[in-house]
Image (cartoon, coloured by chain):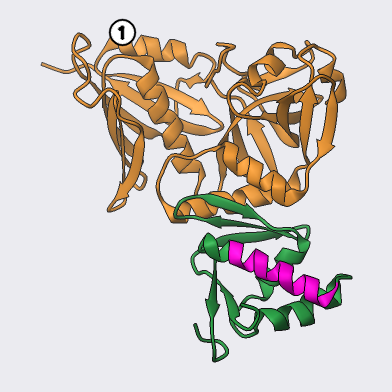
């Protein structure tokens, strides 16, 4: 998963309030709130960088975290969001699903 | 022969609704239900034309049918076990079929308000609200959280807006709360007045009085859970979500843990 390209699902409503994202799927009104670290990953998930790249260039530069621990937590977080269909993964070519 | 009609103009939160029926007794009941919120003139009101079915017979729908609100070619279709209605937001007209009871028309009026407010103005909130020293305090929570308890404990200098459903409208960079006739267990309509919203509290019964400030994202999530919105429409749901986030950015939100006695009002002045 760390070498896949995360991309936010379309048609979601989201806002960042004081550094923490709240995301809603308008189709069923389900709501998710993210902590600051998860919000950084969420905002960077545009399909152009792998999860590893996002953690290295965004998370590790903004938060004092061990890189390998950060990767593992990011994988867990990304899998959780993917399970709720609000994050998708593109494998291979950058920017493509 | 001329068929008589009996209009009742209802003005809640500055949004006029005119309920029209051909039954004088029903009209009087409606006027009594919304006492304090009726007006001689209603201007550009939403016209709600009520056709009463035979009160001695059960409504022709399934009595246990849950509320469903959906849009068909621009017309909002509302249906529940005790009524059916069609609301045209462009023509600002609504037709309702129901028995001569106060609960069905009350639901229709609440739904019309949510649909009227959602495109950009505000929302109805499952919350008690009150004005103190010119500032509105919102006390939100699901049934059993303590809305009616807090309303019943309010001291004399507090003007109650509602113990059940609060009317929130965007006003410049802030929000105002207005009184509503939508009552909970207290059974007493709010005052027909408005004030800028100063604080939002989510109610929790507790062994001691305590206030905990909420992070904005969590507050927005809790707020969304308490907004009354009935329509299955992703576009409007997104708009309500945006408004809820704007509200949280403008109004401090906290959890209010309280013991049910009057001392709690000393904490939320």
Residue A70 spot, x, y in % from top left: 78, 71
The residue tagged 1 is B25
Tell me: residue A46, above or below residue B72: below
**10 Å neighbourhood of mark 1: few (<14), some, or many (≥20)?**
few
Which part of the image, by quadrant, shows the C terminus of chain B?
top right
Element type where label 1 sits in the image: helix
Which part of the image, by quadrant, shows the N terminus of chain B?
top left
Residue B80 spot, x, y in % from top left: 31, 30
Residue B77 visible to the viewer? yes
What is chain B's hue in the picture? Answer: orange
Residue B152 spot, x, y in % from top left: 69, 11
Residue nearest the viewer, comparing B45 with B131 = B131
Left or right position of B36 against B260: left
Asked whether B219 falls inside the magenta stretch, the response is no
Residue B156 spot, x, y in % from top left: 78, 10
Residue B247 visible to the viewer? no
In terms of image quadrants, where is residue A66? bottom right
Tell me: residue B27, above or below residue B209: above
Residue nearest the viewer, comparing A8 with B196 = A8
Residue nearest the viewer, comparing B219 with B159 = B219
In terms of image quadrants, where is residue B100? top left
Measuring 70% from the left and 69% from the top, which residue is drawn there? A74
| Stretch of the chain drawn in magenta | A66-80
In terms of image quadrants, where is residue B258? top right
Magenta region's main secondary structure? helix
Asked whether A77 falls inside the magenta stretch, the response is yes
Q: Residue pushed farthest left?
A: B1
Tell me: residue B55, above or below residue B220: above
Residue nearest the viewer, comparing B112 with A50 = A50
Measuring 58% from the left and 11% from the top, which residue is drawn there? B188
What is chain A's hue in the picture? Answer: green
Identify the subunit bearing mark 1: B
């Amino acid at each position: 998963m760390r070498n896949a390209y995360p991309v936010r699902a379309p048609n979601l409503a989201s806002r960042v309030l004081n550094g923490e994202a709240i995301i809603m799927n308008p189709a069923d009104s389900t709501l998710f709130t993210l902590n600051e670290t998860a919000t950084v990953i969420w905002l960077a998930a545009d399909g152009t960088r792998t999860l590893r790249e996002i953690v290295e260039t965004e998370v590790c530069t903004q938060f004092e975290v061990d890189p390998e621990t950060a990767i593992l937590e990011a994988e867990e977080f990304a899998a959780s969001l993917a399970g709720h269909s609000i994050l998708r993964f593109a494998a291979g070519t950058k920017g493509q699903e | 022969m001329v068929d008589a009609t009996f209009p009742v103009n209802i003005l809640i939160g500055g949004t006029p609704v005119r309920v029209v029926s051909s039954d004088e007794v029903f009209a009087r009941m409606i006027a009594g239900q919304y006492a304090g919120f009726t007006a001689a003139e209603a201007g550009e009101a939403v016209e709600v034309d009520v056709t009463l079915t035979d009160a001695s017979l059960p409504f022709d729908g399934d009595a246990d049918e849950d509320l469903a609100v959906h849009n068909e070619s621009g017309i909002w279709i509302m249906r529940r076990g005790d009524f059916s209605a069609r609301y045209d937001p462009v023509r600002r007209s609504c037709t309702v079929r129901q028995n001569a009871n106060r609960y069905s028309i009350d639901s229709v009026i609440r739904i019309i308000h949510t649909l009227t407010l959602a495109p950009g103005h505000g929302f109805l909130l499952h919350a008690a609200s009150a004005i103190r020293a010119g500032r509105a305090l919102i006390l939100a929570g699901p049934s059993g959280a303590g809305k009616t308890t807090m309303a019943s404990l309010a001291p004399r200098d507090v003007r109650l807006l509602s113990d059940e459903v609060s009317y929130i409208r965007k006003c410049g960079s802030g929000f105002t709360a207005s009184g509503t006739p939508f009552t909970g267990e207290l059974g007493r309509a709010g005052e027909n007045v408005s004030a800028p919203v100063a604080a939002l509290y989510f109610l929790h019964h507790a062994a001691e009085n305590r206030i905990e400030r909420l992070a904005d994202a969590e507050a927005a999530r809790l707020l969304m859970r308490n907004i009354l919105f009935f329509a299955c429409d992703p576009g409007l749901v997104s708009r309500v979500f945006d408004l809820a986030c704007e509200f949280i950015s403008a109004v401090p939100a906290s959890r209010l843990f309280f013991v049910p006695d009057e001392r709690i009002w000393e904490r939320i002045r």
